[in-house]
Image (cartoon, grey):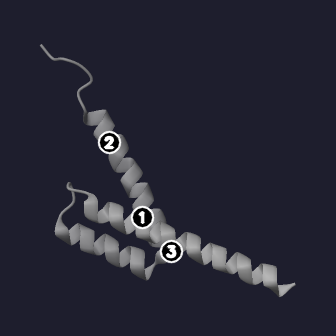
């Protein structure tokens, strides 16, 4: 009975760890952010694993959407 429950917990922990690692890699690869912002996001992700990753993901997706809106779509004359 408890074997499946333990396996589920391990799976959830592994998923959270993978998401944290991916978020940290993306934070430090982002060239648009300052070092201070990178350090603050790193602390948020490490100290608040689920909330930090969700906050970073929302911020990252909104930043990508804003970049697409600000990009010129064609040749300007």
Q: Nearer the viewer, mark 1 or mark 2?
A: 1
Q: Is residue 59 left or right of residue 67?
A: right
Q: Which residue is mark 3?
A: 17
Q: Is residue 63 above or below residue 7?
A: above
Find the residue positioned furthest to the top. 77
Say which residue appears at 24% left-offset and 19% top-offset. 74
Q: Quadrant of residue 5?
A: bottom right
Q: Is residue 36 left or right of residue 9?
A: left
State the quadrant of the C terminus. top left
Q: Are marks 2 and 3 in contact (CB under 8 Å)?
A: no
- N-term-proximal mark, 1 vs 2: 1
- N-term-proximal mark, 1 vs 3: 3
Percent coordinates x, y for residue 46 in the rendering: 40, 79
Q: Which residue is mark 1?
A: 22
Q: Which residue is mark 2?
A: 66
Query: What kind of element bears circle 1?
Result: helix
Q: CA distance from mark 2 to mark 3?
A: 28 Å
Q: Nearer the viewer, mark 2 or mark 3?
A: 3
């Amino acid at each position: 009975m408890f074997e499946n429950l333990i396996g589920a917990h391990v799976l959830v922990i592994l998923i959270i760890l993978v998401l944290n690692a991916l978020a940290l890699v993306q934070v430090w690869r982002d060239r648009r952010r300052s070092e201070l912002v990178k350090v603050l996001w790193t602390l948020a992700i490490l100290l608040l694993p689920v909330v930090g990753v969700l906050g970073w993901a929302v911020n990252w997706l909104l930043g990508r959407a804003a970049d697409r809106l600000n990009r010129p779509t064609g040749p300007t004359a």
